[in-house]
Image: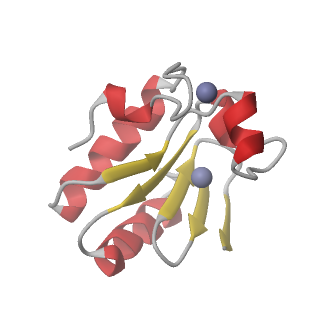
Amino acid sequence: MIVKSKFKCKCCGINKIDYHVIELCKLIEYTVGFPLNVNSGYRCRKHNTAIGGAKNSQHLKGFAADLSGKDLSKLKEVCKNLWDHKEIGGYGIYRTFVHVDMGKHRTWKG
Ligand SMILES: [Zn+2]
Ligand SMILES: [Zn+2]
């Protein structure tokens, strides 16, 4: 289930996640109808570098989340639809999770 504490930095526990990201993830969770995991939310600079995140990653601003759940196909379908309706800024599609953020409207495959 989506709660704010799940978005904290994995290395230091600092949580600068933006309120809008939490609301977006709650909407996604409600729409898919099953609980979501937050694989990555806010990242401090040190952690972002450690895991090889992009230098200007939206995770650093607290504007992004990587999500997964029991039905990844459904999750991807719902995110694509929300992205089409511009509810999602950046939408990254990966094998085991999806990345959603509040940045510019764009999409990519990882
Ligand atoms: Zn950290
Ligand atoms: Zn991400």
* Relative to 98, residue 41 above or below: above
User: Residue 39: where, in percent of width, then height?
Assistant: 44, 51
- In the image shown, does 80 or 51 lie closer to the viewer? 51
Q: Residue at x 49, y 64 (%)?
A: 98
Q: Residue at x 51, y 78 (%)?
A: 95
For residue 99, what is the image quadrant? bottom right
- Location of the C terminus by quadrant is bottom right
Q: Residue at x 48, y 22 (%)?
A: 13
Residue 12 seen in this snapshot: yes
User: Residue 3: where, in percent of width, then height?
Assistant: 27, 32
How many numbered dots are placed on residues in this image? 0
Would residue 65 appear left or right of 52 to someone viewing this image? left
User: Residue 70: where, in percent of width, then height?
Assistant: 23, 70
Q: How is the image coloured?
A: secondary structure
* Relative to 107, residue 99 above or below: above
For residue 105, what is the image quadrant? bottom right
For residue 50, what is the image quadrant? top right
